[in-house]
Amino acid sequence: MAGISNAQVHEVREITRIERIGAHSHIRGLGLDDSLEPRKISQGMVGQLQARRAAGVVLGIIREGKIAGRAVLLAGQPGTGKTAIAMGMSQALGTEAPFVCMAGSEIYSLEMSKTEALTQAIRKSIGVRIKEETEIIEGEVVEVQVDRPATGVGVKIGKLTLKTTEMETIYDLGNKMIESLMKEKVQAGDVITIDKATGKISRLGRSFTRARDYDATGPQTRFVQCPEGELQKRKEVVHTVSLHEIDVINSRTHGFLALFSGDTGEIKSEVRDQINAKVSEWREEGKAEIVPGVLFIDEVHMLDIECFSFLNRALEDEMAPVVITATNRGITRIRGTSYSSPHGIPLDLLDRMIIIPTIPYTEQELKEILKIRCQEEDCEISDDALIILTRIASETSLRYAIQLITTASLVSRRRKSTEVSTEDIKRVYYLFLDEHRSTQFLKDYQDEYLYDQGANGQVTETPEMEVCQ
Ligand SMILES: Nc1ncnc2c1ncn2[C@@H]1O[C@H](COP(=O)(O)OP(=O)(O)OP(=O)(O)O)[C@@H](O)[C@H]1O
Ligand SMILES: [Mg+2]
C-alpha cells in the first residue's frame, strides 16, 4: 500500500507544476494555529486577524457537519481580502467537504432559471459519503498453473496458489479468471487482490521477498509487503459524490455524460424528490452519510430579490450547506426592487446571516502581502522598490500594486536584470494608469471622447458621431 500512496503523491506534484499563478494562488489556508488563533503571517495570509479568526470558527461549524443552513457574510471595502479568506477556508477544508464557488452574476448567464441555478449550486455543495463493503482475496502469488487442452481449443483450467504470511491456499481457476490473470500478466511473486463479487484482479506490486529476482523487475516495478493474516478480507470502499451528481446520473434526459460537459440543463423536481428519499433511506440503513459543504457566493449583491427570497427558504432546509457570501457594497439598491438596504441584501436575509467585517490593511501588512506575491511570481525585488510599491498600494489600491509586480518584472528582465529596481516600478507606474489617474485623464480629455455624457449627463456631439450615422 505504501507504494500506491507514494505513486499518488507523485502524481499530484505533477499536476501542481502546470498550475498557473492566479490572484489567490499564494493562499494555502487560513494561517491559524491549533487553537484557532491566527498567526500574523502564515500560509500566504497576512493580517486581517479578526476576520480570519471568525472564519476559523465557521470552519469548525462546517467540519462538525451538524448545523445546516447557516449563512455568513464577509463585508468590507474592495481589496480587503474577502475572496482571499474564502479561498483560505476552501484550502483549509481540503477534500473533506465540497466547496463550491460562484459569482452572484453567474445565475443570469446560464441557460436555466435563476432558482434552478441556485438549487444546482446548493446541491453541488452537499456531499453524500457512500460506504460499500466488498469481499476481496489478497495475497502473494506462489504459483499459477494453467492446463491447456492438447488441441489448443476448448476450456482451459488451472490452479492459483496464493499465500499470506500466515497461510497458503490453492484456488481452482475457470476460463474467465485465467484470461484476466493473463491480461494482468500475473506471475509468481506478484501481490494481487481479487474482488470476489466482480472477479476483477488488480496487481498491487511485487513482493519484497522477490526483490532479488532481477529478471522480473523493470524500472517501474513497485515492491510491496506480503499481506498478513487471512487471505479473504472485507474491505470498506468509500466514495463521496455530491447530491447534484446523483441527480444528473439519475436524470433520464441527461445521463452521466452531462457531468463532463457541464450542460446539465434543468432537472425535474420529481427526480430530486426521489433522490432525497433514496438518500435518507441509505442514511437510515447506515450506508450513507451526508457531508454538508460550503456554497460560496462572491459579489452577492448581484443576486436579485427573487434569489434572495429563494435563499431564505433554502437555508431552512435540513440538507442546506453553509452559505458564505461576500460583498463590497455599502447601503445600496436591492437588485429587482427600488428599495435600498445595507450591502444590497434584504433585511430579512441579513437577519439570518452572521457578518464578518474586513478592514483596510496597514502599510506594514500591505508590504508583507506584496512580498508574498513577489515570491509567488518568482520575482526578485530590491528593498527600495518594495517600499515604493507599498506606497503605491496604500495610495492607489493593493490590486494595482500586485499588477505592477508582473509588469515591472517583465521590464527588468528586458534590461537583463534579475532584480526589480525602483526605476522599473517607476516606469510601469507611468505606463499603466490606476483607476484614479485614469478618471483624471478622462476628466481632462472628456470632450474628445465618443458619446461622452459630460459632467451634467448630456451627450456632447462630436464630429465622429456624425461620421457614424
Ligand atoms: N490577508 C491577505 N493575505 C494575503 N493576500 C491577501 C490578503 N488579502 C488580500 N490578499 C490578496 O490581495 C488581492 C485582493 O484581495 P481580494 O481579491 O481577496 O479582495 P476582495 O476583498 O475580495 O475585494 P473585492 O471586494 O473587490 O472583491 C488578492 O490577490 C488577494 O489574494
Ligand atoms: Mg472579491
Image (tube, rainbow, N blue to C red):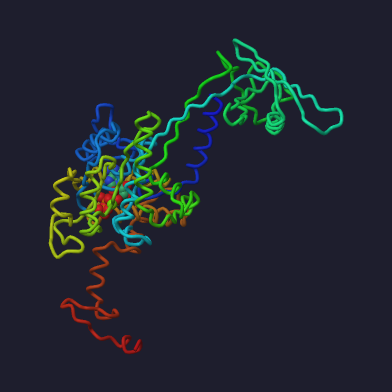
Q: How many marks?
A: 0
Percent across and percent down for residue 237 are 48, 29
Q: Is residue 8 above or below residue 434?
A: above
Q: Is residue 352 above or below residue 303?
A: above
Instruction: Name the image quarter holding the C terminus.
Output: bottom left
Residue at the image point whose x is 22% and y is 46% from the top? 363
Where residue 404 sits, quadrant-wise, is: bottom left
**108 to the left or right of 137:** left
Query: Front-most of 68 and 72?
Result: 68
Percent across and percent down for residue 260 are 48, 51
Residue at the image point whose x is 74% and y is 23% from the top? 158
Where residue 152 sits, quadrant-wise, is: top right
Q: Is residue 406 above or below residue 133?
A: below
Query: Front-most of 441 and 192?
Result: 192
Outermost right residue: 151
Query: Front-most of 353 and 381?
Result: 353
Percent across and percent down for residue 177 are 68, 29
**339 to the left or right of 120:** left
Outermost top residue: 166
Query: Front-most of 42 and 275?
Result: 275
Percent across and percent down for residue 221 are 65, 28
